[in-house]
Image (spheres, rainbow, N blue to C red):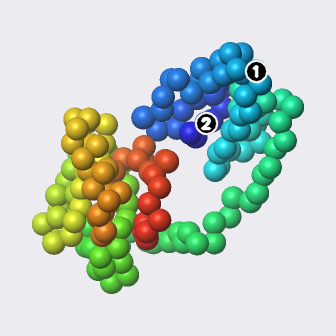
Amino acid sequence: AMFAIDEAHCVSQWGHDFRPEYIQLSVLHERFPHIPRIALTATADAPTRREIIQRLALEDAKVFVSGFDRPNIQYRIMENQGNARDRLLRFIRNEHEADAGIVYCLSRKKVDDTAEWLSSKGLKALPYHAGMGAEARKRNQDRFLREDGIIIVATIAFGMGIDKPDVRF
Protein backbone atom coordinates (compact mmCIF):
# COMPACT_ATOMS: atom_id res chain seq x y z
CA ALA A 1 0.00 0.00 0.00
CA MET A 2 1.12 3.55 -0.60
CA PHE A 3 0.60 6.04 2.18
CA ALA A 4 0.95 9.81 2.41
CA ILE A 5 0.54 12.35 5.20
CA ASP A 6 -2.14 15.01 5.10
CA GLU A 7 -2.27 18.15 7.28
CA ALA A 8 -4.12 16.28 10.03
CA HIS A 9 -1.25 13.72 10.25
CA CYS A 10 -3.45 10.83 9.19
CA VAL A 11 -2.49 8.03 6.87
CA SER A 12 -4.20 8.90 3.61
CA GLN A 13 -4.45 7.34 0.22
CA TRP A 14 -2.75 7.58 -3.11
CA GLY A 15 -5.07 6.51 -5.87
CA HIS A 16 -8.76 5.77 -6.11
CA ASP A 17 -8.58 2.13 -5.04
CA PHE A 18 -7.15 2.76 -1.57
CA ARG A 19 -8.82 0.48 0.94
CA PRO A 20 -10.12 2.10 4.15
CA GLU A 21 -9.21 -1.16 5.91
CA TYR A 22 -5.53 -0.14 5.76
CA ILE A 23 -6.21 2.50 8.42
CA GLN A 24 -7.57 -0.26 10.66
CA LEU A 25 -4.43 -2.40 10.51
CA SER A 26 -3.44 -1.20 13.97
CA VAL A 27 -6.00 -3.64 15.38
CA LEU A 28 -3.64 -6.49 14.45
CA HIS A 29 -1.23 -5.57 17.23
CA GLU A 30 -4.07 -5.23 19.71
CA ARG A 31 -5.65 -8.59 18.86
CA PHE A 32 -2.48 -10.56 18.16
CA PRO A 33 0.30 -8.97 20.24
CA HIS A 34 2.71 -11.92 19.86
CA ILE A 35 2.41 -12.33 16.09
CA PRO A 36 5.30 -10.71 14.15
CA ARG A 37 4.36 -7.93 11.75
CA ILE A 38 6.20 -6.09 9.00
CA ALA A 39 5.34 -2.93 7.06
CA LEU A 40 6.77 -2.49 3.56
CA THR A 41 6.57 0.47 1.22
CA ALA A 42 8.47 1.34 -1.92
CA THR A 43 8.35 5.12 -1.77
CA ALA A 44 7.50 6.45 1.71
CA ASP A 45 9.45 9.50 2.83
CA ALA A 46 10.59 9.96 6.47
CA PRO A 47 7.38 11.61 7.77
CA THR A 48 5.27 8.93 6.11
CA ARG A 49 7.42 6.15 7.56
CA ARG A 50 7.05 7.68 11.03
CA GLU A 51 3.28 7.82 10.57
CA ILE A 52 3.11 4.19 9.46
CA ILE A 53 5.24 3.11 12.43
CA GLN A 54 2.99 5.03 14.82
CA ARG A 55 -0.29 3.90 13.26
CA LEU A 56 0.74 0.25 13.20
CA ALA A 57 2.35 0.30 16.65
CA LEU A 58 5.76 -0.65 15.29
CA GLU A 59 7.80 1.77 17.43
CA ASP A 60 10.17 -0.99 18.60
CA ALA A 61 10.67 -2.44 15.12
CA LYS A 62 13.90 -2.16 13.15
CA VAL A 63 13.65 0.11 10.11
CA PHE A 64 15.56 -0.62 6.92
CA VAL A 65 15.68 2.06 4.23
CA SER A 66 17.43 1.81 0.89
CA GLY A 67 17.62 4.36 -1.90
CA PHE A 68 14.75 5.25 -4.13
CA ASP A 69 16.90 5.30 -7.25
CA ARG A 70 15.76 2.68 -9.73
CA PRO A 71 18.49 2.45 -12.38
CA ASN A 72 16.33 0.10 -14.45
CA ILE A 73 13.68 2.82 -14.85
CA GLN A 74 14.19 5.44 -17.51
CA TYR A 75 12.33 8.75 -17.66
CA ARG A 76 12.10 10.87 -20.75
CA ILE A 77 10.89 14.43 -20.89
CA MET A 78 10.01 15.60 -24.36
CA GLU A 79 8.88 18.88 -25.73
CA ASN A 80 5.28 18.72 -26.86
CA GLN A 81 5.88 18.61 -30.59
CA GLY A 82 3.36 17.14 -32.95
CA ASN A 83 0.68 14.61 -32.23
CA ALA A 84 1.13 12.86 -28.85
CA ARG A 85 -0.73 9.78 -30.05
CA ASP A 86 1.54 9.40 -33.04
CA ARG A 87 4.62 9.76 -30.81
CA LEU A 88 3.21 7.11 -28.44
CA LEU A 89 2.61 4.73 -31.33
CA ARG A 90 6.13 5.31 -32.71
CA PHE A 91 7.62 4.75 -29.24
CA ILE A 92 5.80 1.43 -28.81
CA ARG A 93 6.48 0.17 -32.33
CA ASN A 94 10.12 1.32 -32.48
CA GLU A 95 11.24 0.42 -28.97
CA HIS A 96 8.71 -1.98 -27.45
CA GLU A 97 7.12 -4.02 -30.20
CA ALA A 98 5.22 -6.93 -28.58
CA ASP A 99 6.21 -5.82 -25.04
CA ALA A 100 3.86 -5.48 -22.08
CA GLY A 101 3.43 -1.91 -20.91
CA ILE A 102 1.30 0.60 -19.06
CA VAL A 103 0.12 3.88 -20.56
CA TYR A 104 -1.22 6.34 -18.00
CA CYS A 105 -3.92 8.88 -18.81
CA LEU A 106 -5.42 11.62 -16.66
CA SER A 107 -9.09 10.83 -17.28
CA ARG A 108 -11.32 7.81 -17.79
CA LYS A 109 -12.44 9.13 -21.16
CA LYS A 110 -8.83 9.50 -22.29
CA VAL A 111 -8.16 5.93 -21.10
CA ASP A 112 -11.06 4.58 -23.17
CA ASP A 113 -10.17 6.67 -26.24
CA THR A 114 -6.46 5.79 -26.11
CA ALA A 115 -7.03 2.05 -25.60
CA GLU A 116 -9.49 2.02 -28.50
CA TRP A 117 -7.08 3.99 -30.72
CA LEU A 118 -4.09 1.74 -29.92
CA SER A 119 -6.25 -1.31 -30.62
CA SER A 120 -7.28 0.17 -33.96
CA LYS A 121 -3.55 0.36 -34.77
CA GLY A 122 -3.15 -3.39 -34.24
CA LEU A 123 -1.86 -3.39 -30.66
CA LYS A 124 -3.35 -5.42 -27.80
CA ALA A 125 -4.47 -2.50 -25.62
CA LEU A 126 -7.03 -2.74 -22.81
CA PRO A 127 -8.57 0.00 -20.66
CA TYR A 128 -8.53 -0.01 -16.86
CA HIS A 129 -10.25 2.59 -14.64
CA ALA A 130 -12.69 2.87 -11.76
CA GLY A 131 -15.61 3.72 -14.05
CA MET A 132 -15.59 0.25 -15.60
CA GLY A 133 -17.62 -2.58 -14.16
CA ALA A 134 -15.70 -4.72 -11.67
CA GLU A 135 -15.91 -7.79 -13.92
CA ALA A 136 -14.54 -5.99 -16.99
CA ARG A 137 -11.77 -4.38 -14.94
CA LYS A 138 -10.78 -7.76 -13.45
CA ARG A 139 -10.90 -9.44 -16.87
CA ASN A 140 -8.54 -6.81 -18.33
CA GLN A 141 -6.17 -6.98 -15.38
CA ASP A 142 -6.10 -10.79 -15.54
CA ARG A 143 -5.29 -10.69 -19.26
CA PHE A 144 -2.52 -8.19 -18.59
CA LEU A 145 -1.03 -10.47 -15.94
CA ARG A 146 -1.39 -13.73 -17.93
CA GLU A 147 -0.75 -12.77 -21.53
CA ASP A 148 2.35 -11.44 -23.26
CA GLY A 149 2.39 -8.11 -25.04
CA ILE A 150 -0.72 -6.60 -23.44
CA ILE A 151 -0.77 -2.84 -23.01
CA ILE A 152 -2.94 -1.54 -20.19
CA VAL A 153 -4.17 2.01 -20.63
CA ALA A 154 -5.09 3.22 -17.17
CA THR A 155 -5.62 6.01 -14.74
CA ILE A 156 -2.82 6.50 -12.23
CA ALA A 157 -4.50 4.22 -9.64
CA PHE A 158 -3.41 1.18 -11.67
CA GLY A 159 -0.09 -0.53 -11.11
CA MET A 160 0.39 -0.64 -7.35
CA GLY A 161 0.88 -4.22 -6.31
CA ILE A 162 1.09 -5.54 -9.87
CA ASP A 163 3.47 -8.49 -9.99
CA LYS A 164 4.37 -8.84 -13.66
CA PRO A 165 8.08 -9.22 -14.37
CA ASP A 166 7.99 -8.29 -18.06
CA VAL A 167 6.50 -4.77 -18.02
CA ARG A 168 8.86 -2.82 -20.28
CA PHE A 169 7.27 0.64 -20.52
Residue drawn at (63%, 35%), measured in percent from left and top? 4
61 vs 98, nearest the viewer = 61
Residue drawn at (33%, 83%), measured in percent from left and top? 94
Mark with earlier residue (1, 2): 2
Q: Disc number at residue 66?
A: none
Classify mark 1: residues with Cα within 10 Å, few (<14), some (14-19) or many (20+). few
Q: Disc number at residue 33?
A: 1
In this picture, is 142 found above or below 85? above
The image shows residue 20 at horizontal and vertical percentages of 51, 23
Classify mark 2: residues with Cα within 10 Å, few (<14), some (14-19) or many (20+). many
Residue drawn at (54%, 72%), measured in percent from left and top? 74
Number of numbered discs present?
A: 2
Left or right: residue 167 compared with residue 7: left
Could you give the CA–CA distance between mark 1 and mark 2, rounded to whole angstroms?
Answer: 23 Å
In this picture, is 38 found above or below 122? above
Residue drawn at (70%, 20%), measured in percent from left and top? 32
Asked if residue 89 shows in the view, the reply is yes
Q: Which residue is mark 2?
A: 3
The image shows residue 28 at horizontal and vertical percentages of 66, 22
- Label 2 SS: strand
Left or right: residue 81 compared with residue 137: right
The image shows residue 12 at horizontal and vertical percentages of 58, 29
In this picture, is 49 found above or below 7? below
